[in-house]
Amino acid sequence: MRDVYEVLREKEKAIQRVDQEIRLLRLAASLLNDGTDSGLITDDPRRDGTEATEDAKVGTAKRISARLRRLATPLLEASRSAS
């Protein structure tokens, strides 16, 4: 049986790691919201008066995801090497 304090330390470390990832993703999201992509992330399915197609939504989501990955990768690598 594992030591309760060891399990607690592991869980606390995991929480810290997730907290750091959340902070990094918030930073990346704020960098994405630099004014050039102001219409990309929205709850409104219509853009410029026309209804967006599912393909357009998927394409937008893929572009945002790729950009987030590019922005977050160096930050995550730096945080992992600091740990």
Image: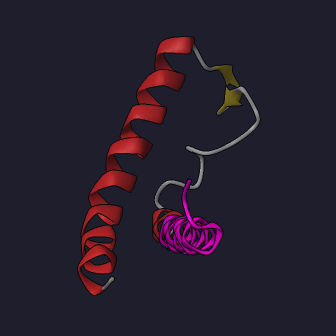
Query: Furthest residue to the bottom?
Result: 82
Q: Is residue 13 visible?
A: yes
Q: Which quadrant is home to the C terminus?
A: bottom left
**Quadrant of the rendered structure where residue 63 is?**
top left
- How many numbered marks, from 0 up? 0
Span shown in magenta: 1-27
Magenta-drawn stretch contains 15: yes
Q: Is residue 35 visible?
A: no
Query: Furthest residue to the front?
Result: 1
Query: Furthest residue to the top?
Result: 54
Q: Position of residue 14 (x, y in %)?
A: 53, 65
Taking the spot 48% from the left edge, 34% from the top edge, the residue there is 61
Q: Position of residue 57 (x, y in %)?
A: 54, 24
Looking at the image, is 35 positioned above or below residue 9? Answer: above
**Residue 52 or residue 18, whichever sits in front:** 18
Taking the spot 46% from the left edge, 60% from the top edge, the residue there is 36
Magenta-drawn stretch contains 8: yes
Q: Position of residue 25 (x, y in %)?
A: 50, 64
**Residue 18 or residue 76, whichever sits in front:** 18
Taking the spot 46% from the left edge, 67% from the top edge, the residue there is 28
Left or right relative to 26: residue 82:
left
Looking at the image, is 35 positioned above or below residue 75? Answer: above
Taking the spot 41% from the left edge, 26% from the top edge, the residue there is 59
Left or right relative to 3: residue 82:
left
Colour scheme in use = secondary structure
* Secondary structure, magenta segment, majority class: helix
